[in-house]
Amino acid sequence: MIPEIRKLVSYQEDVLIEGFKPADPPWRLYAVAAVLTNPWAGRFEEDLKPIIHAYGPILGETLTNRITEMTGGGEQIEAFGKAGVVGLDGEIEHASGLIHTLRFGNFFRQAVDAKSYLAFTNIRAAADTSIQIPLMDKNDVGRRSHYLTIQFSIADAPRANEVIVALGAATGGRPHHRIGDRYQDLKDLGHDVDNPAAV
């Protein structure tokens, strides 16, 4: 089983000025997406696992290779994320299934040598919807400078029987970052900075 990919889409945004000041160096955001036929469209399938296991590695490798080529290598990427958009004849579970598997995401995580999990969105929508990919620091989930969102749209996708699977990346955090990190809030509130999950 291999995914039927109708097209691959690439997006790049170079921010030269942010907050009335130059962004030095330019702040670069990237996204890549695969538009593919939803193998479960229009019907209820109890067991999604066989197709998830078959499609995940192919989509993960294809999109990871494409985005790291755009950025000049995984070491250039500081923030990352993923998204799935299923067309109107599909379930949210279909978008979730294709991106929430280590067989998909670990290609990207390994390529950028990440410790964090991939931030994500998964939605059902019609063609030309805004695809929003939340990003965060690849090694530090509390680093707020790298809480970002890259957004773009594909005019003719997803069709009702399609799914969009996408990856996003940034070469740095927001220019002129000045709101502090999550750890300072924890400290100010008297919580254990070394065990934020306890909050």
Image (cartoon, grey):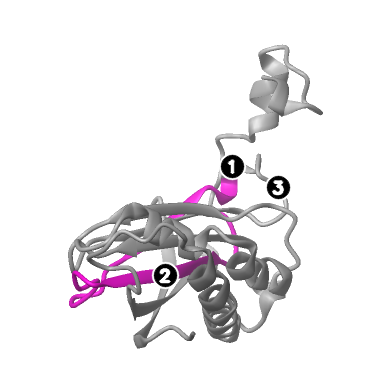
Considering only vertical position in the picture, is 191 above or below 50?
above
Can you tell which mark lies on residue 144? 1
Kind of element beneath mark 2:
strand
| Residue at 55% across, 82% down | 58
Q: Residues within 10 Å of mark 2 (few under 14, many from 20)?
A: many
Mark with earlier residue (3, 2): 3
Mark 1–mark 3 distance (CA, rounded to whole Å):
9 Å
For residue 171: magenta? yes
Residue 27, image x, y percentages = 51, 65
> In the visual, does 182 lie left or right of 86?
right
Q: Which residue is mark 3?
A: 140
Give the magenta-colored segment's residue range. 145-173
Relative to 142, does residue 170 appear above or below in the rendering? Answer: below
**Is 143 on the left or on the right of 147, as rendered?**
right
Asked if marks 1 and 2 touch (Cβ < 8 Å), the reply is no
Q: Disc 3 on helix, strand or loop?
A: loop
Q: Nearer the viewer, residue 65 or 11?
A: 65
In the displayed structure, does residue 66 sit left or right of residue 89? right
Q: Comparing marks 3 and 2, which lies closer to the viewer? A: 2
Pointer 2: what residue?
Answer: 165
Name the residue: 34% across, 78% down. 35
Q: On the image, which quarter does residue 112 sit in? A: bottom right
Residue 148, position in %: x, y? Answer: 48, 52
Q: Residues within 10 Å of mark 3 (few under 14, many from 20)?
A: some
Earlier-in-chain disc, 1 versus 2? 1
